[in-house]
Image: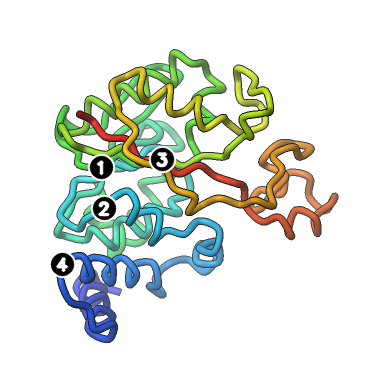
């Protein structure tokens, strides 16, 4: 599907929705991007757990923004962001070094679907080596990280703080950092490397505030009260990873994806 065709489809959905006003139009456009049949079916099946319209809306996304997505992994959110921002905004994904095997695989995925990813820019985030390219300082309106912070904590608190500081530097004054991650009950001890994949929400707030961010709000959009956060194999026992394979699979399927914090920080 050509990019122009996707744009017409988004417009048609907006008209069918009978939207009025800029905010309503933005919401309808985002809903259309999430509902698009160009998304991979296995990705769309996870919407019930990841609530992309509500999550991105909470972070205040707009089509005219410069958005940075940190460590997109398989590109679950990238697929939505690239479609939504289209030619009005700008999306930069910062993951593996573009020259590395992982970075090359990512670029091949983008090249295979130019109608979706044609306008995406590629940066870099190497937390272990402390190498970051999120675009020019003060250029981003919105920096997003989905289920990544626990991986950086595994490397060390200094490395994690360096990532958050790089995000702070990339944002314009008034810019937003949006964070989701697996949430550990505050009554349960968190080890230094977040070995279970779960983090205290208070820890993430303190971490962000230590580099200059101010907490603007938290949401229960991605909460899952069925998740007890004490699984054999950590959070990866749950879907979509299923690290324990068929062991207790029905139990984990009934739980669904993890209980997640959803945090909005602002650069003063």
Binning the other alpha carbons within 10 Å of mark 1 as few (below 14), some (14 to 19) or many (20 upward) gives many
In the picture of the structure, the residue carrying the numbered disc 3 is 263
Question: Is disc 2 placed on a helix, strand or loop?
Answer: loop
What is the spatial separation of the Cα atoms under label 3 and label 2, in whole angstroms? Answer: 14 Å
Q: Which colour scheme is used?
A: rainbow
Residue with the most extreme bottom position? 16
Q: Which residue is drawn at 46% across and 28% down?
A: 204
What is the spatial separation of the Cα atoms under label 1 and label 3, in whole angstroms? Answer: 13 Å
Q: Quadrant of residue 37?
A: bottom left
Q: In which quarter of the image is residue 191?
A: top right
Give residue 1's position: percent from left, percent from top: 30, 74
Q: Earlier in the sequence, mark 3 or mark 2?
A: 2
Question: Is disc 4 placed on a helix, strand or loop?
Answer: helix
Binning the other alpha carbons within 10 Å of mark 3 as few (below 14), some (14 to 19) or many (20 upward) gives many
Determine whether 164 is above or below 183 in the image. Answer: above
In the picture of the structure, the residue carrying the numbered disc 1 is 142
Q: Earlier in the sequence, mark 1 or mark 4?
A: 4
Tell me the mark number nearer the camera, choosing from 3 and 2.
3
Question: Is disc 1 placed on a helix, strand or loop?
Answer: strand
Q: Which of marks 1 and 3 is nearer the N terminus?
A: 1
Tell me the mark number nearer the camera, choosing from 2 and 4.
4
What is the spatial separation of the Cα atoms under label 2 and label 4, in whole angstroms? Answer: 13 Å
In the picture of the structure, the residue carrying the numbered disc 2 is 61
State the quadrant of the C terminus: top left
What is the spatial separation of the Cα atoms under label 2 and label 1, in whole angstroms? Answer: 7 Å
Q: Disc number at residue 22?
A: 4
Binning the other alpha carbons within 10 Å of mark 4 as few (below 14), some (14 to 19) or many (20 upward) gives few
What is the spatial separation of the Cα atoms under label 1 and label 4, in whole angstroms? Answer: 19 Å
């Amino acid at each position: 599907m050509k990019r122009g065709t996707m744009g017409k489809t988004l417009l048609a959905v907006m008209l069918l929705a009978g939207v009025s006003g800029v905010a309503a139009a933005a919401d309808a456009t985002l809903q259309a991007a999430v509902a698009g049949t160009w998304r991979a079916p296995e990705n769309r099946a996870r919407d019930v757990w990841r609530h992309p319209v509500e999550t991105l809306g909470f972070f205040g996304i707009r089509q005219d923004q410069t958005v940075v997505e940190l460590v997109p992994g398989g590109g679950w959110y990238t697929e939505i962001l690239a479609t939504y921002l289209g030619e009005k905004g700008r999306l930069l994904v910062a993951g593996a070094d573009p020259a590395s095997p992982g970075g090359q695989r990512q670029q091949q995925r983008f090249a295979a679907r130019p109608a979706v990813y044609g306008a995406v820019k590629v940066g870099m985030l190497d937390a272990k080596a402390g190498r970051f390219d999120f675009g020019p300082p003060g250029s981003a309106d919105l920096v997003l990280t989905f289920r990544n912070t626990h991986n950086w904590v595994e490397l060390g608190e200094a490395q994690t703080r360096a990532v958050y500081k790089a995000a702070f530097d990339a944002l314009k004054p008034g810019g937003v950092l949006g964070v989701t991650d697996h949430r550990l009950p505050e009554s349960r001890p968190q080890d230094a490397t977040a070995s279970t994949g779960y983090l205290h929400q208070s820890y993430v707030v303190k971490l962000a505030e230590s580099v200059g961010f101010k907490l603007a709000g938290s949401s229960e959009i991605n909460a899952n009260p069925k998740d007890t956060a004490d699984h054999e194999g950590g959070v990866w026992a749950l879907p979509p990873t299923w690290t324990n394979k068929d062991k207790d699979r029905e139990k984990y399927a009934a739980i669904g994806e993890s209980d997640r914090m959803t945090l909005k920080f602002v650069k003063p």
